[in-house]
Amino acid sequence: MDLKQIMQNYFLDLDAAAKDPDRKVAWCTSVGPAEILRAMGFDVYFPENHGAMLGATRLCMETIPVANSKGYSPEICSYLTSDIGAYLKNITPLAKAYGVEDVPRPDVLVYNTNQCKDVMHWFEFYAREFDAPIFGIHSPAHLPEVEPEHIANVVAQFKQLIRSLEEITQEKFDPKKLERCLALSSGATSLWSEVLKTAIADPSPFSFFDATIFMGPIVVLRGTEIARDYYRDLLMELEQKVATTRSRENAVQKRVYWEGMPIWGRLRHLSELFKRNDTCVVASTYCNSWIFADFDPHDPLPSMALAYLQIFINRNDTYKEKYISDMVKMYSVDGVIFHAAKTCPNNSNSYYNLPGRLKRNGIPTIVIDGDLCDLRCFSDEQSTNVIEAFLETL
């Protein structure tokens, strides 16, 4: 099944679930415990995915001011302001894309602060609007190492979450269903990792901009056969492409790494900019964020806690410096582009001199200003000048 059909089926099924009194919908943060929700029979919706769609379609430029006018600052997460503004304005990109008029009403909302605190405020808004129960996993943050006490802390919160969800489903939690769900998630995320690693090839079979599209199922369909099967087929396709185009004649001249959020409303512009300059963005922190190598179906809750605590965004700068340095070597990268997203400090790692530290280690870096959704923070002309000047130096 192709990606377009997979995403259409996902949203149409969510729409059907929201209209069926016998089914329950859970809202979850994108790096939250979706496997627990799915194992307990919930259909799972991810507001951050909706925020990205609002950014990619640029509908956000109509909706962010609506949220701002209701007291949500232009300085906070523009996924949040895009999404809440869309709710207040009663519009959604799902209508044009899939014929779905509304996002699904939640029966419960579950967030994880391993990404940031904004998700808590975001979900609390909707809990009030829909008068729905809300639960949070409050993760130990900015960790140099994940220690056993951190894992025990999160496992205890998972167990409390499960007890609370049992009251909503009125069914006893079945550990076997979680093991099955986690096995599917583990399979899908392993395949996603292998998909991304095909970009080690020169020429790379795809760019970061393609990967932001490929990643749909690993975000919204973890724990299903659909995601696993999609990445199995995609990996085969990309491996064949690598095998048939392996030629230095086809190799791009430069290879760079994207650190930070995508600029959703300018993906095509940036993709064409790099193409014009014979450069491929071969890897990114962002797309790697859905690789959960620690998932273990035989040890579900502790392995989930470890995987969700290990994520890049939840680590300290020493870890991040080593991680990016390792990626530079693995992908034979010539330089790193940091995107300083105005409304997303948690995913902007340029503020505390990480680019300078990498530069001192011999890795060329630049910083461009922008935002994940709010295009008022991004200049085509300035970013083009900075990027092209940087590429000339590599």
Image (cartoon, rainbow, N blue to C red):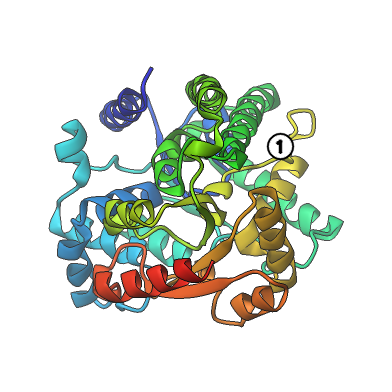
Q: Taking 62 as reference, is 47 left or right?
A: right
Can you identify the residue that label 1 sits on? 295
- The picture quadrant where one finds residue 85 is bottom left
| Helix, strand or loop status at disc 1 | loop
Pick whichever, 342 or 121, lies toward us: 342
Q: Is residue 158 visible?
A: yes
* Image position of 67 (left or right of 331): left
Q: Residue at x 68, y 65 (%)?
A: 320
Q: Nearer the viewer, residue 27 or 234?
A: 234
Is the residue 58 above or below the residue 53 in the image?
below
Q: For the residue marked with disc 1, what is the amino acid? A: Phe
Residue 105, image x and y in percent?
30, 42
Q: Please report the residue visible at 18 percent of the width from the left and 76 percent of the height from the top.
A: 69
Check the image and report above or below for 7 versus 291.
above
Of 96 and 363, nearer the camera is 363
Quadrant of the snapshot with the C terminus: bottom right
Within 10 Å of disc 1 (Cα), the crowding (few <14, some 14-19, many 20+) is: many
